[in-house]
Amino acid sequence: MSQFLQFYFSLNDRGAAAEKQMERTLRLALSADPDADPVEAGGEVDEELLNQIMAIAHSAAADGNPLPLDERDAISVDLGPGATVSAFSDSVPPECPQCHDLLDDWDPQEWWDGGDEPEEECPSCGFTALIGDWHIGSTPYARTECGLVLVDWPDLTEYGPELHEALLTTVGSRPRYVSGHV
């Protein structure tokens, strides 16, 4: 059975600042009812659940490995190096924000191996920027040190646009969103 994943993440933040941002982002998600239409923040937050999710994130970060998908609940958090996002079966290469051509030959291997976010040049128009500044909403791969993961929630871009924007605003600097099916 297919799972729909949504990742709200920051490309710049790490450490204590990222942890505070993720706690605020998690609080927003926990205050929403995914069965409502539209999905909106504003309900009560289960503090025990918030603390439990953050403790799981700390444990995974201490191990140096993000939580495997099959061990994630409907809401989880990634902290620390090694966390990744992907649109999985819905993946397409990064898209140039200037000419909209796809970077078909993009190889994320160095970034995957723990390198810095790569800078890429569009072979069509010459646009050059860090890959996170390209259109990566359906990327096959991105690395982060802080992110919120929603599993099998409704697509918030459609069914909770205000919450979607609030999550992006809260998640940190250089906020990004990636979604896809596993």
Image: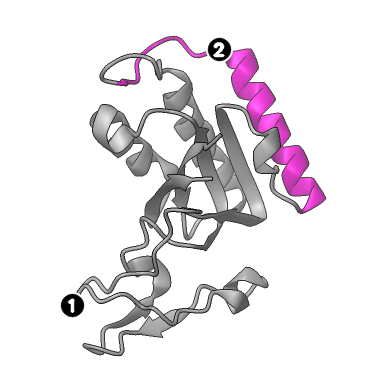
Residue 23 is covered by the magenta coloring:
no
Q: Residue at x 72, y 33 (%)?
A: 56
Left or right of 97? Residue 3 is right
Q: Is residue 172 above or below residue 120?
A: above
Highlighted range, magenta = 39-64
By secondary structure, the bulk of the magenta-drawn segment is best described as: helix
For residue 46, the mark is 2
Q: Point out residue 133 in the picture as x, y percentages from the top left corner.
A: 34, 68
Residue 75, quarter of picture: top right
Residue 55 lies within the magenta run: yes
The amino acid pointed to by label 1 is Cys
Residue at (60, 46) in percent of width and height: 16
Whichever of callouts 2 and 1 sits on the residue coming sooner in the sequence is 2
Query: What x and y, as percent, mark residue 113?
Result: 67, 72
Drawn side of residue 65 relative to residue 178, left or right? right
Which residue matches tag 1?
99
Q: Is residue 35 visible?
A: yes
Camera-nearest residue between 91 and 80: 91
- Kind of residue sitting beneath label 2: Asp
> Is 30 on the left or on the right of 126, as rendered?
right
User: As displayed, is residue 45 above or below residue 126?
Assistant: above
